[in-house]
Image (cartoon, rainbow, N blue to C red):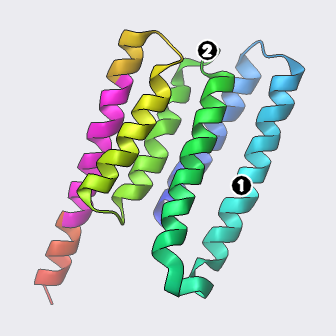
Amino acid sequence: MHLLNTYFTPFALILTVFAIYFSPLEKQTIYTTFGILAVTFVINWWVSKNEYKFFKWIQKIRILTVIFNLLITAIIFYLLGSYWAPTWLLFLIAPSASAMFMKRFHVFLIALTAALLMLGTILWAIASIHAIFVILFSLFVNSMSEMILKARNSSR
């Protein structure tokens, strides 16, 4: 999860800030988006900082974090998606995070949920291609994670 926070969180922030800066948004949409980003950043930072204090529930905390981030992604996508096409890339983050610690079927469910959340907003054909990519990319990350774990365990 820390790797995802290191790489994907800055990407998500940059993508969202670019969407806000380069799009003709109403002030209310801008303020709402920045508010959502601020709250999300604080919550994710706190969870990341404190998840090992609740080690007994770490799996459930990670699952809730993935679901929370997926819902936040959907809200930001609905706010900015029609103004800034690359916002669909935000839907890769939650399924990629789930791919690091969930079983393949659960990764598929998270990726499918991300894909379905995306389908209602932009042109159907374009959204379908994006949605398929989200699912396949997440399953790819899951396979890579499993392969790395197998290689690590076999070298012991």
Query: In this figure, which residue is indicated by the disc labeled 1?
Result: 41
Q: Quadrant of residue 64?
A: bottom right
Q: How packed is label 1: few (under 14 Cα within 10 Å), some, or many (20 or more)? A: some
Q: Up-down: is 101 above or below 33?
A: below
| The residue stretch that appears in magenta | 130-146
Q: Quadrant of residue 15?
A: top right
Q: Up-down: is 144 above or below 121?
A: below
The kind of secondary structure element at disc 1 is helix
Q: Quadrant of the C terminus?
A: bottom left
- Please report the residue visible at 48 percent of the width from the left and 37 percent of the height from the top: 91
Which amino acid, mark 2?
Ser
Residue reaching furthest to the left? 154
Q: Residue 38: where, in percent of width, then height?
A: 79, 49
Q: Is residue 140 magenta?
A: yes
* Label 2 vs 1, first from the N-terminus: 1
Query: In this figure, which residue is indicated by the disc labeled 2?
Result: 82
Q: Is residue 28 left or right of residue 109?
A: right
Alpha carbons under labels 2 and 1: distance apart: 23 Å
From where the camera sits, is residue 12 visible? no
Q: Residue 88: where, in percent of width, then height?
A: 50, 28
